[in-house]
């Protein structure tokens, strides 16, 4: 049984006119424990929607998402939130740090919703991403590259089995993007976490051995199909 197993997944959004438009139609998708995979997809092709479904942030219209053999869709909201915090790390394009909290607090808050605050581990993770001297800085006092490194530490804070990365280097310059990506891959490898990254950036995709085309996976045939 793979770490992640998706079957007959379907998701659509309501349009303002009252209709619906289907964004996700994935028959089957699997990711093994510790595996690294990148999905290549155009903007608007449903990549973020897919990751949000995997994370349990969005509920599917149909289909199953088995993470470690447990179907997310069958869990209640509270159980799903807890499970997400404990098993999934999410890295966003826009970092999504809490601006009113320090670097260390951002990582500890991630822990508070998951396996519990462990300051020693939070500090060691921040050291791992090169931010030992920035623990008490606020996000706005950091460069974009440093902010994304905080987000990487936060994503790893609960020792997740799966890390989702949504265009994680989209707001970084070339050099920082390359370094951030290498760091994400290293910390995932060190902790044994599987990594699923989505991107439209060929330079990002080129750093992965395993790259799949999202369009081949996501077979949205009729845009008028209502959810
Ligand atoms: P990507 O991440 O590949 O750019 P998204 O998953 O963000 O794609 O979006 C896929 C499609 O779904 C787009 O056409 C987008 O406009 C639409 N969409 C995304 N989120 C919503 C939403 N909350 N409500 C309605 N439509 C949405
Ligand atoms: Mg997106």
Image (cartoon, helix red, strand yellow):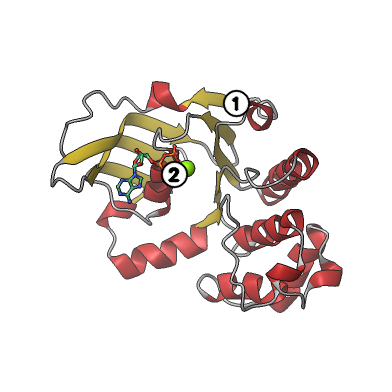
Residue 120 visible in the shown view = yes
Residue 214 location, quadrant: top left
Label 2 secondary element: helix
Is residue 76 or residue 169 the one in the foreground? 169
User: Which quarter of the image is occupied by the N terminus?
Assistant: top left
Q: Residue drawn at (45%, 60%), measured in percent from left and top?
A: 84
Q: Is residue 29 left or right of residue 153?
A: left
Residue wearing tag 2: 48
CB at mark 2 closer than 8 A to ligand 2? yes
Name, please, the residue furthest toward the front. 17
Residue 69 visible in the shown view = no
Residue 7 drawn above or below residue 94: above
Residue 21 placement (x, y as % from top left): 22, 37
Residue 100 drawn above or below residue 2: below
Q: How many marks?
A: 2
The answer to the question of whether label 2 and label 1 lie on touching residues, with beta carbons closer than 8 A, is no
Residue 188 placement (x, y as % from top left): 67, 47
Residue 107 placement (x, y as % from top left): 65, 70
Residue 194 location, quadrant: top right
What distance separates the C-alpha of mark 2 from that of mark 1? 19 Å
Say which mark, if any, is on residue 210: 1
Is residue 62 or residue 7 the one in the foreground? 62
Q: Is residue 220 left or right of residue 69?
A: left
Say which mark, if any, is on residue 120: none
Q: Residue drawn at (43%, 53%), measured in percent from left and top?
A: 55
Q: Nearer the viewer, mark 2 or mark 1?
A: 2
Residue 221 placement (x, y as % from top left): 25, 23
Number of other residues with Cα within 10 Å of mark 2, as a class: few under 14, some 14 to 19, many 20 or more: some
């Amino acid at each position: 049984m793979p770490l992640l197993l998706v079957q007959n997944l379907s998701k659509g959004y309501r349009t303002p006119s009252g209709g619906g438009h289907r964004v996700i139609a994935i028959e089957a998708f699997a990711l093994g424990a510790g595996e690294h995979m990148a999905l290549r997809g155009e903007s608007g092709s449903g990549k973020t929607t897919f990751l949000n479904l995997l994370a349990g942030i969005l509920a599917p219209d149909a289909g199953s998402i088995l993470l470690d053999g447990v179907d997310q869709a069958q869990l209640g909201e509270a159980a799903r939130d807890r499970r997400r915090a404990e098993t999934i790390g999410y890295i966003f394009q826009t970092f999504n740090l809490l601006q009113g909290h320090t670097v260390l607090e951002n990582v500890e808050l991630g822990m508070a919703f998951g396996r519990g605050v462990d300051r020693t581990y939070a500090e060691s993770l921040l050291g791992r991403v090169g931010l030992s001297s920035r623990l008490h800085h606020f996000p706005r006092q950091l460069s974009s590259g440093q902010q994304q490194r905080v987000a990487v530490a936060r994503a790893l804070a609960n020792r997740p089995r799966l890390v989702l990365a949504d265009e994680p280097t989209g707001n970084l310059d070339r050099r920082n993007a390359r370094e951030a990506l290498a760091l994400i891959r290293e910390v995932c490898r060190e902790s044994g976490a599987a990594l699923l990254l989505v991107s439209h950036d060929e330079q990002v995709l080129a750093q992965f051995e395993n790259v799949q085309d999202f369009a081949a996976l996501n077979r949205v045939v009729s845009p008028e199909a209502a959810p």
